[in-house]
Each structure stands twice: as structure tokens, then as C-alpha cells.
Image: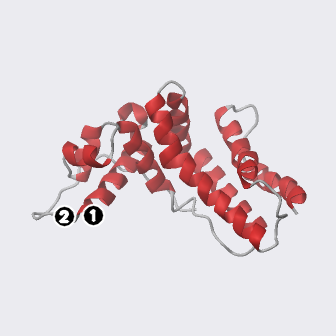
Amino acid sequence: MAELTPDAQTPARRGRGRRPADQVRAEILTAAGELLLAEGMAGFTIEKVAAHAGASRMTIYKWWPSKGALALDGYFTVVAPTLAFTDTADIVADLTNQLVAFVHLVRDTTAGRVISQLIGQAQTDPELAAAYRERYSGPRRALAVETLSRAMARGQLRPDIDPESVVDQLWGACYHRLLIADLPLTEDFARTLVDNLIRGLR
């Protein structure tokens, strides 16, 4: 698993000349993600992101309608490499690898604290809740459903399963232990989830 090392202490120094829009957008997203992991939502502001990315507030607001939208896009950007879905043509291995990577990410890095904060704030902030669904949980869910659908097409899983429910059973269980720490969120727990569930999917 790639180690997340947030570093949002020193604003970027930019050379002269106009940067391509794609580069500016990428640098804003990286700055947003790193700032979020370093300081959480309490320290996350558009002004800080603009300073670290070397971009104007106007540019940021042109692409992101709110602080929450930018935070979620930044978070997705920095965690996406760690949470990439592999396709080895072995659905058990792919689900296990992805779920284990997710557990290590939210348990062993500041990403877990940050996503917990975002979920908590989204309960009373409709704008943040919408951004969470549209910019993080929705895209993450779509990737998992796509992985399961490929396995169904290959005959590795029953054709009548509901991929959306499988996503809830696997990742939902991990989020439950992250947010309500009655029992520890461990790698063994992730492996057991896949092992238990896969028996009913074949």
C-alpha cells in the first residue's frame, strides 16, 4: 500500500508563465487532498488551498461550488492510487486486496480520521452530504459494482446477485467498525468478510 504523507506546510513556489488548465486543476486537487489529510476539515479552507496550489480563489470557485466539494475531490485524488481496484480475473483476490487496502488506509493513516469527520459533518450539512455522495461514495461504489459485474459476466459469481447489496455488506461493515469502534477494524476482519460472503455468491 502506498504511504500517504500529507505535507501542506509550505506554499508552492511557481515559475513565471501561465500553466495549462489541466495542470492547475491537478495541483489544486493535490494541494486540497494534502491539506485535508494534514489538518482535517477544521483547518481546511479555500484560501489555504489556493496558497499551496499557487492558484486564485476565483479559479477554485470556477471548478468547485463549495469547500466540501473541493475537500471530497481532493480526498478522492490522494487516496485513489491506494484504493485502485485490481483486475486479476480472480474476484476473491481482487475483493480481498481492495478491502485490505481500504482497512489499512482508514486505520493506519490520517485518511481514516478525515473520512470520519466528513461523514459526521455530512449528517447536518446537506451540501457536504451531496458532495460526499457525488464526489466520493458514488464513484467508489461504481468502481466496486463494476468489479462485481465483471465477475458475474465471467461466471465467477451467480448472475442473480445484487452488486449494490454486496458493496454494502463488505464496505459497510468496515465503515461500521471505523465509526463505531465496538470491535477493531483489522485485516483479518476484512479477509473474513470476503470469505464469509463469497460462499453465498457462487
Can you tell which quarter of the image residue 98 is in?
bottom right
Q: How far apart are the alpha carbons under marks 2 and 1?
A: 6 Å
Labels 2 and 1 touching (C-beta < 8 A): yes
Q: Which mark is residue 19?
A: 2
Nearer to us in this view, 89 or 145: 145
Q: Residue at x 9, y 63 (%)?
A: 16
Identify the secondary structure beneath mark 1: helix
Q: Mark 1 belongs to which amino acid?
A: Gln
Which quarter of the rendered picture does the N terminus lie within? Answer: bottom right
Query: Could you classify mark 2 by the number of other residues whose Cα lies within 10 Å: few (under 14), some (14-19), or many (20 or more)?
Result: few
Q: Is residue 123 above or below residue 160?
A: above
Identify the secondary structure beneath mark 2: loop
Regarding residue 97, the answer to whether it shows in the image is yes
Q: Residue at x 17, y 59 (%)?
A: 14
Nearer to us in this view, 106 or 133: 133
Query: Could you classify mark 1 by the number of other residues whose Cα lies within 10 Å: few (under 14), some (14-19), or many (20 or more)?
Result: few
Residue furthest top in the image: 124
Label 1, on which residue? Answer: 23
Is 136 situated left or right of 191 in this image? left
Q: Is residue 50 above or below residue 122?
A: below
Is 165 situated left or right of 49 in this image? right
- Picture coordinates of residue 158 (x, y %)? 85, 64
